[in-house]
Image (cartoon, rainbow, N blue to C red):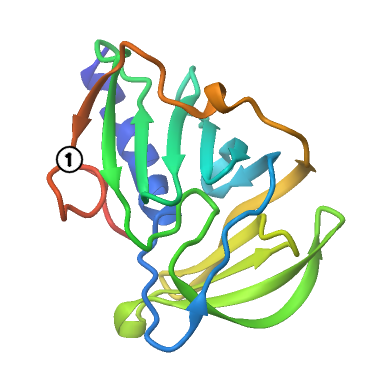
C-alpha cells in the first residue's frame, strides 16, 4: 500500500514545487503581505482545492488533492518564511517537515519583489497585478493582490505556457483564532538542512 502510493505522492510534490516558484527580481519593490484576517477557498493546478486562513502574518492551509483521501495541512509563517507541512502518508501521520522557503511563492501568497503592471477583477474583487521574474528569467510569474494585499491569483510560465496555479473562488474577511494557525502540539517536526530548496523528492518544474 505504501509503495503503491509513490506515484500519487510524486504528483502532489510536483504541485508543491509549482506553488513555491523561486521569485528574485533585481529591480522591483517588495510585494506587500496581507494586512487583515481572512479565509479563502481556491482552486489549484491539477484539480486540487485549497482552504486558507490568515492572521497576523501566519497562515494555515488545507489542500485537497484527487489522489489523497485526507487533506494536506500546512502552517506558514510569512515573516520568518518558514512552512511546516503535514503529509497524509501512511505510517507518518504525526510527522511534519519544516522548510525555509525564502522569497518563494507560498501557496498563492508571493513574497520577495515585483512590479505593479495593471489590475483586474477575480471572484468579484478588484486586484492589482504584480509581475515577478525569477533569477535567470526562465520562470515568469504574476500575482493579483487586493487593496489589503490578499492574493487572489498566481500564474506562472510552465513549459512555455502560462498556467494558473492558484485562484480564489470565495473570500471572507473575518477574525481568525490564532491557535488554529499554530502547529499542533505533539507533532514530530523534521527540519530540512538550511539552504536546501524544497522538500526532498519534490521535482522542480
Query: Which quarter shows the C terminus?
Result: bottom left
Can you give x and y, in whole percent of width and height, for residue 17 in the image? 36, 52
Does residue 60 lie above or below 116 as drawn? above
Query: On the picture, is 56 further left or further right than 120?
Result: left
Query: On the picture, is 116 further left or further right than 30?
Result: right
Query: Which quarter shows the N terminus?
Result: top left
Can you give x and y, in whole percent of width and height, for residue 197 in the image? 22, 54
Can you give x and y, in whole percent of width and height, for residue 201 in the image? 20, 42
What's the residue at 52%, 33% (across, down)?
60
Identify the image quadrant of residue 26.
bottom left
Q: Residue furthest bottom?
A: 27
Mark 1 is surrounded, within 10 Å at the Cα level, by few (under 14), some (14 to 19) or many (20 or more) other residues, namely some
Does residue 156 lie above or below 76 as drawn? below
What's the residue at 48%, 84% (across, down)?
28
Q: Residue furthest left?
A: 193
What's the residue at 45%, 50% (across, down)?
78
Identify the image quadrant of residue 139.
bottom left
Can you give x and y, in whole percent of width and height, for residue 101 in the image? 32, 53
Q: Nearer the viewer, residue 160 or 143?
A: 143
State the residue position of label 1: 192
Identify the image quadrant of residue 5.
top left
Q: Nearer the viewer, residue 106 or 161?
A: 106
Does residue 176 lie above or below 204 as drawn? above
What's the residue at 44%, 32% (across, down)?
74
What element does badge 1 sit on? loop
Amino acid at each position: 500500500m505504501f509503495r503503491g502510493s509513490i506515484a500519487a505522492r510524486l504528483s502532489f510534490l510536483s504541485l508543491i514545487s509549482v506553488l513555491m516558484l523561486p521569485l528574485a527580481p533585481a529591480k522591483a519593490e517588495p510585494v506587500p503581505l496581507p494586512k487583515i484576517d481572512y479565509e479563502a477557498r481556491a482552486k489549484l493546478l491539477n484539480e486540487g482545492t485549497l482552504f486558507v486562513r490568515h492572521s497576523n502574518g501566519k497562515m494555515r492551509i488545507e489542500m485537497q488533492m484527487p489522489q489523497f483521501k485526507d487533506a494536506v495541512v500546512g502552517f506558514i509563517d510569512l515573516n520568518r518564511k518558514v512552512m511546516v507541512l503535514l503529509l497524509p502518508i501512511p505510517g507518518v501521520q504525526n510527522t511534519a517537515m519544516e522548510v525555509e522557503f525564502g522569497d518563494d511563492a507560498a501557496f498563492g501568497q508571493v513574497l520577495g519583489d515585483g512590479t505593479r503592471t495593471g489590475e483586474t477583477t477575480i471572484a468579484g474583487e478588484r486586484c492589482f497585478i504584480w509581475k515577478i521574474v525569477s533569477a535567470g528569467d526562465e520562470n515568469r510569474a504574476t500575482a493579483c493582490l487586493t487593496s489589503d494585499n490578499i492574493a487572489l491569483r498566481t500564474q506562472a510560465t510552465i513549459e512555455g505556457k502560462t498556467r494558473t496555479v492558484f485562484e480564489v473562488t470565495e473570500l471572507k474577511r473575518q477574525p481568525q483564532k490564532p491557535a488554529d494557525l499554530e502547529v499542533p502540539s505533539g507533532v514530530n517536526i523534521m527540519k530540512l538542512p538550511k539552504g536546501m530548496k524544497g522538500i526532498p523528492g519534490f521535482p522542480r518544474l
